[in-house]
Amino acid sequence: MSRLLWIALLAFSLSGCDVPDRIARTSSDVAGNKAIVRGYIENIINQGKWETYDQYMHPQIGFNDRRIDQMEFKRMIMSFKRAYPDITLSIQAQIAEGDRVVTRLVCRGTHLGTDNGVPATGRKVEYIGISIDRIKDGRIVEMWYLGDIWDRMQQIKGTQADTP
């Protein structure tokens, strides 16, 4: 009986030795995943550096439950950039667990092109959004984005006080 107890204690203590390694590995993966999302937002969205696309994005990504390729993703972003050429996304907070990163954003820009049928107004907008990204092999493979479109449309239509 004491031999079995000794083996169990030895196994328990040895298995505990790699717990800090596992925690460190998970923490660095989470930190790396957050950095990938920050890099994509800053380089592709804010600065328009499309040459960095392959660094951050998988060739085929899931976007709001649709499979799209790089060209469709670029068309989507460029269409939005035509309406808000100076749009910037500022990260307010990020939470990550495993292969998922949740990012709370503030989007700011000037309405200088058509947005959802509303012609340019020149009004400044500021609204919030949340993105949920899944990372695999160091690149984004799935994205969910929810923005406060209601607030943005109210701002460009002038039906509420403009945001400073």
Image (tube, grey):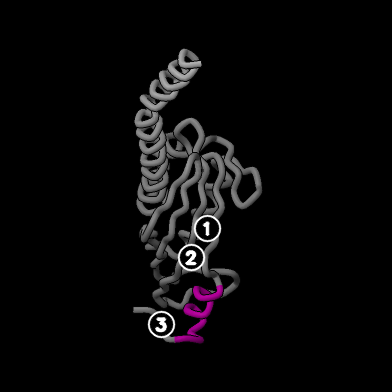
**How far apart, in angstroms, are the residues tagged by discs 3 and 1?**
23 Å
Compared to residue 78, the image places residue 124 above or below, namely: below
Mark 1: secondary structure: helix
Q: Could one spot residue 51 in this view of the protein?
A: no
Q: Amino acid at mark 2?
A: Ala
Relative placement, left or right, of 1 versus 161 is: right
Q: Nearer the viewer, residue 65 or 18?
A: 18
Relative placement, left or right, of 66 versus 17 is: right
Residue 11's tag is none
**How far apart, in angstroms, are the residues tagged by discs 2 and 3?**
17 Å
Q: Amino acid at mark 3?
A: Asp
Q: Which residue is mark 1?
A: 79
Position in image of residue 13 (x %, y %): 39, 24
Question: Which residue is pictured at 50% across the width and 73% down the height?
Answer: 152
Q: Are marks 1 and 2 in contact (CB under 8 Å)?
A: yes
Of circles 2 and 3, the one toward us is: 3
Position in image of residue 104 (x %, y %): 43, 60
Residue 83's tag is 2
Mark 2: secondary structure: helix
Sequence-wise, the earlier of marks 2 and 3 is: 2
Q: Amino acid at mark 1?
A: Ser
Most frequent secondary structure within the magenta stretch? helix
In magenta stretch: residue 153? yes
